Amino acid sequence: MPSRWVADLLSDTLTQPTQAMRLAMAEAPVGDDVFGEDPTVAELESRVAELLGHEAGLFTPTGSMANQLGMRLHVEAGQEVIADSLAHVLRAELGAAAVLSGISSRSWASERGRLEPDAPLGLMSVGAGPYQVSTALIVLENTHNFGGGTIQSLEAIREVRAASQTAGVAMHLDGARLWNAHVATGIPLADYGREFDTVSVCLSKGLGAPVGSVLVGSREHMERARIWRKRFGGGMRQVGILAAAGLHALDHHIERLADDHARAARFASAVGAVAPSVVSPELVETNIVMLDVSETRWAPAELVDAAGARGIRAYAAGPRAVRLVWHLDVDDAATDAATEVFTDLLA
Ligand SMILES: *Cc1c(COP(=O)(O)O)cnc(C)c1O
């Protein structure tokens, strides 16, 4: 179904499966995955695990379920997870870790979601005994969604890993957009992946699959996660039909993320040139552009409405920000149109 928007920059979850992807889905060999008999799911799980430098993988319907399984594996009820205050696991999973797993949480403040090692390491509470909550897990997010597509530095991650591992605290990566960090930096996915006990990645964001995420970790962790996935209601049957979309995306939609990054950068420099307080182009690292409208005459919702009236859809993200996200279904022409509308409204 063609979009009614000239440029739909609401989210990179909106992509329509391509014709080639639909064909791959239609032709996928399938079996009952609850019995471990779907060859396409097995192929996807092992390919993603290998890409990320881990032993095994587990296909999940959503990134939230993959993150919840990751947290469940490392944190006992009554222990805590720590993450930055803008993290998806704390802000956008509706308290699932507390509701489903009895997990307590605390957070540190960050600038645009960027990891400063002292923040988690200073917050971490190890062996707190019978008096305080003990930290069992640190969750990092790369790239950082609400931070505006921020890429985490591998050196910073390694510093946190070294200190937390010594302290016996596990690490989980919410890598919904790890693909974008990999393409933007050229750092192999496995170099990021190996620093964590478990990693979740989304197939349904920039990669353009209709559904699906993969959790990776050790074989033993994935065996336990498989049990909890079933318990959470995520045991799926002939789901190779969806895994096939993920395999197709791995083959065809990773390298092209560079196009999304280039278009987002081009948009940001044009808007930054006419409205320097609104966006600093050097802060646009991947496919997400955050506009800060606090020094303009616009409230976020009003700017979104004005752009919407001219065919450009964006997202009002809090009291001062408007978010735009580039993806598979936004080409150069749509980027030009969005640039014209926003430079016009913000000049
Ligand atoms: C989209 C996203 C997820 C997973 O979201 P689902 O809608 O549950 O698939 C997890 N983390 C981040 C950072 C995301 O952007």
Image (cartoon, helix red, strand yellow):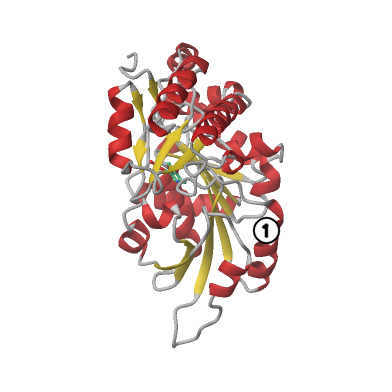
Residue at (37% x, 60% y) in the render: 97
Q: Quick one: SS at disc 1?
A: helix
Question: Against 287, is 229 above or below?
Answer: below
User: In the displayed structure, would residue 190 be above or below residue 22?
Assistant: below
Q: Which residue is drawn at the image coordinates 65% and 67% (left, top)?
A: 165
| Residue 91, percent from left and from top | 37, 55
Picture quarter with the N terminus: top left
Asked whether 87 or 342 is in front, the reply is 342
Work out whether residue 66 or residue 205 is closer to the camera in this orientation and state it.
205
Is ligand 1 within 8 Å of the beta carbon of the residue shown at mark 1? Answer: no
> Toward which corner of the image does residue 76 lie, by quadrant?
bottom left
Residue 184 seen anywhere in this rendered image of the structure: yes
* Residue 42 visible in rendering: no
Q: Residue at x 62, y 55 (%)?
A: 196
Left or right: where 84 falls relative to 64 = right
Residue at which label 1 appears? 156
Query: Could you tell me residue 29's position as x and y percent?
Result: 48, 20
In the rendered picture of this protein, how many numbered marks are placed on residues?
Answer: 1
Q: What residue type is labelled 1?
A: Ala
In the image, taking residue 155 as reference, residue 329 lies left or right, namely left
What's the residue at 34%, 49% (across, down)? 318
Callout 1: few (<14), some (14-19), or many (20+) C-alpha neighbours within 10 Å?
some
Picture quadrant of ligand 1? top left
Where residue 329 appears, x then y in whole percent? 45, 20
Q: Quadrant of residue 184?
A: top right
Where does residue 100 sit, x and y in percent of width and height?
Answer: 33, 59
Q: In which quarter of the image is the C terminus?
A: top left
